[in-house]
Image (cartoon, rainbow, N blue to C red):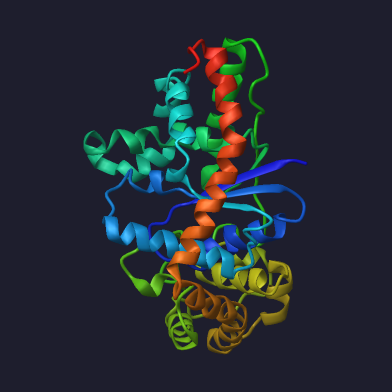
């Protein structure tokens, strides 16, 4: 069976984009793959995090994933920092990857912005640790968003060069999995920007902790244009807010954007938003309620993550031992 690895940063509550673009697909993959899902807290600290908030957010994201239907008995759910094999393999990969490869990473340029010289080394080296996250388990597939495809290409380059340098197929070349009707959910305040936990406006996103009233208010205030909803997919190209809301409907209803456009062609945004609100509440409400129940017992969440990390290390430890042997390290 193919093995999947994917991770999510615990830097705040999950939002609708995380759910539709990642978590819901992870739940659906658990029947067909051996799955490892990771709260990548080591990646999170490439930008400064309040320690208490990082611990709380790690538990909240774990609770959201379980509440959404991810079964920690069938999958491995873990915290990245609980398995030091990730960091140890990342250092070996640092000695395989090339600076020129990292200099081409567009996501670093976007995150560092004009203050590139003040960015942390960890932020620059983020893709190498990401490669180690996946390859320490010899995962074959990585569910990612479109914006992460370049990191998968780097991951494959590192694996290929390591295999060539040490004369054996030590690592597979992982394939990206890009799934679902709304793999890139956009901001409710600006249809040209991705929905993000870091956006200053809470009205830009629907959080997985939002109750029905909050969801209704945010969708009611979501940015639109003055025209009726488009009557064709082609007509959405110059209307990013309409395209975003219709794609959210399509994903929440397990349908297609084409079907959503056909259903609401010519409707007013106010009427459409009422139906979208009812749909969003019906899908997200049970998840939110289960999240709150799980978070009432943080010790049980910690236990799930510890157990997952132990199972993960049972996979990674022999792989890392083989890699260290290939590199020429003495056995301890």
Evaluate whether residue 228 shows in this view. Answer: no
Specify whether 66 is left or right of 93. Answer: right
Specify whether 306 is left or right of 109. Answer: right
Q: Quadrant of residue 58?
A: bottom left
What residue do we see at 67% from left, 79% from top? 265
| Residue at the extreme front | 332
Q: Quadrant of residue 60?
A: bottom left
Specify whether 112 is left or right of 127. Answer: left
Q: Residue 253, percent across and down?
A: 69, 75
Q: Residue 43, percent across and down?
A: 40, 44
What residue do we see at 42% from left, 41% from top? 107
Evaluate whether residue 204 shows in this view. Answer: yes
Location of residue 76 with respect to 326 vertically, above or below = below
Nearest the viewer among 16 and 12 is 12
What residue do we see at 64% from left, 33% from top? 138
Nearest the viewer among 101 and 273 is 101
Nearest the viewer among 85 and 108 is 85
Q: Residue 197, percent across and down?
A: 39, 62
Specify whether 91 is left or right of 140. Answer: left
Give the quarter of the figure containing the N terminus: top right
What residue do we see at 66% from left, 44% from top? 4
**Looking at the image, how many numbered discs can be counted on the residues?**
0
Location of residue 234 with respect to 279 vertically, above or below = above
Location of residue 32 with respect to 128 vertically, above or below = below
Q: Residue 194, percent across and down?
A: 46, 59
Q: Quadrant of residue 210?
A: bottom left
């Amino acid at each position: 069976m193919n093995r999947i690895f994917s991770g999510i940063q615990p830097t705040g509550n999950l939002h609708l984009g995380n759910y539709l673009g990642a978590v819901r697909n992870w739940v659906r993959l658990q029947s067909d793959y051996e799955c490892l899902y990771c709260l990548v807290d080591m990646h999170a600290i490439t930008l400064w995090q309040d320690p208490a908030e990082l611990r709380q957010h790690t538990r909240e994201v774990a609770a959201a994933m379980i509440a959404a239907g991810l079964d920690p008995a069938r999958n491995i759910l873990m915290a990245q920092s609980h398995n030091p094999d990730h960091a140890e393999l990342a250092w070996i990969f640092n000695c395989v990857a090339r600076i020129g490869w990292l200099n081409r990473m567009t996501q670093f340029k976007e995150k560092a912005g004009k203050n590139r010289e003040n960015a942390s080394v960890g932020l620059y080296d983020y893709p190498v640790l990401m490669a180690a996250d996946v390859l320490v388990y010899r995962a074959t597939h990585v569910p990612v968003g479109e914006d992460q495809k370049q990191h998968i290409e780097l991951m494959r380059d590192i694996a290929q060069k390591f295999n060539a340098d040490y004369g054996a197929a030590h690592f597979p070349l992982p394939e990206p999995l890009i799934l679902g009707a709304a793999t890139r959910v956009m901001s409710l305040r600006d249809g040209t920007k991705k929905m993000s936990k870091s956006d200053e406006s809470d009205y830009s996103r629907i959080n997985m902790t939002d109750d029905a009233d909050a969801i209704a208010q945010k969708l009611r205030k979501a940015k639109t244009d003055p025209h009726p909803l488009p009557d064709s997919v082609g007509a959405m190209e110059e209307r990013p807010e309409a395209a975003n809301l219709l794609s959210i409907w399509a994903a929440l209803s397990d349908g297609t954007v084409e079907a959503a456009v056909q259903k609401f062609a010519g409707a007013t945004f106010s009427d459409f938003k009422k139906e979208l609100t009812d749909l969003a509440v019906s899908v997200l409400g049970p998840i939110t309620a289960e999240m709150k129940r799980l978070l009432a017992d943080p010790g049980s969440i910690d236990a799930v993550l510890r157990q997952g990390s132990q199972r993960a290390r049972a996979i990674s430890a022999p792989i890392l031992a083989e890699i260290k042997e290939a590199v020429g390290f003495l056995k301890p």
